Amino acid sequence: AKAIYNQIHGTFTKKSFIEDIAEVSQTRGLVHLQEQLLSDVLKTKVKISSAEMGRSMIWERLYGKRVLVVLDDVKKYDPLDLWEISPWFGEGSVMIITTRDEDLPRLHHADSVFEINLMNSNESLELLSWHAFREAKPKEQYQFFAKKVASY
């Protein structure tokens, strides 16, 4: 999702990428997610006092607008109800949702579903290395720990 976002985000003036949405929604709640979405898209800090106010602000500020929204790691319950509000977005909008719940896209009649295979241990190590060390393989002194982290 991040790779696709990075490729196409330049064509959108209104965009938001919310990582680990399941964890964030459990620890910080719906209002925080709404604030993050609106703050990202509007490029200014937004404070919301209630979930209903947030829903109303999303409608007021994003109705008919062309937006790019990525929600990473959504569980069964989507706390932003974006399945419901995505029709508010304008033509050309893109919403990408990553989930491990195979039934979720079917329940909400997603336009497209792409199934991704899990990475093998070498691919996991390379991904970790690019993020942690900015190179394809960890240096020799980090090899042992990097393999442990990647396998975890």
Image (tube, rainbow, N blue to C red):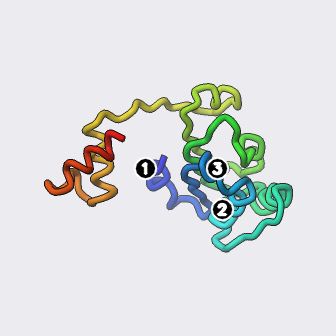
Quadrant location of the C terminus?
Answer: top left
- Residue that lies at the very extreme toward the bottom in this rendered image: 44
Q: Mark 1 belongs to which amino acid?
A: Ala
Residue 105: image x %, image y %? Answer: 63, 31
Residue count near mark 3 (Cα–Cα under 10 Å), binned few <14, some 14–19, many ≥20: some
Residue 31: image quadrant is bottom right
- For the residue pair 1 and 122, the one nearer the viewer reads as 122
**SS category of the residue bearing label 2:** helix
Residue picked out by circle 1: 3
Residue displayed at 56% across by 43% down:
73
Q: Is residue 110 left or right of residue 126?
A: right
Residue picked out by circle 2: 36
- For the residue pair 120 and 144, the one nearer the viewer reads as 144
Query: Disc 3 or disc 2, which is closer to the eye?
Result: 2
**SS category of the residue bearing label 3:** loop
Cα gap from disc 1 to disc 3, whole angstroms:
18 Å
Q: Is residue 45 left or right of residue 1?
A: right
Cα gap from disc 1 to disc 2, whole angstroms:
20 Å
Cα gap from disc 3 to disc 2, whole angstroms:
18 Å
Q: Which mark is residue 61?
A: none
Marks 1/3 in contact by CB < 8 Å: the verdict is no
**SS category of the residue bearing label 1:** helix
Mark 1 or mark 2: whose residue is earlier in sequence: 1
Q: Mark 2 belongs to which amino acid?
A: Gln
Residue 27: image x %, image y %? Answer: 65, 54
Residue 14: image x %, image y %? Answer: 63, 62
Q: Is residue 95 above or below residue 62?
A: above
Q: Mark 3 belongs to which amino acid?
A: Ser
Q: Which mark is residue 93?
A: 3
Residue displayed at 45% across by 55% down:
6
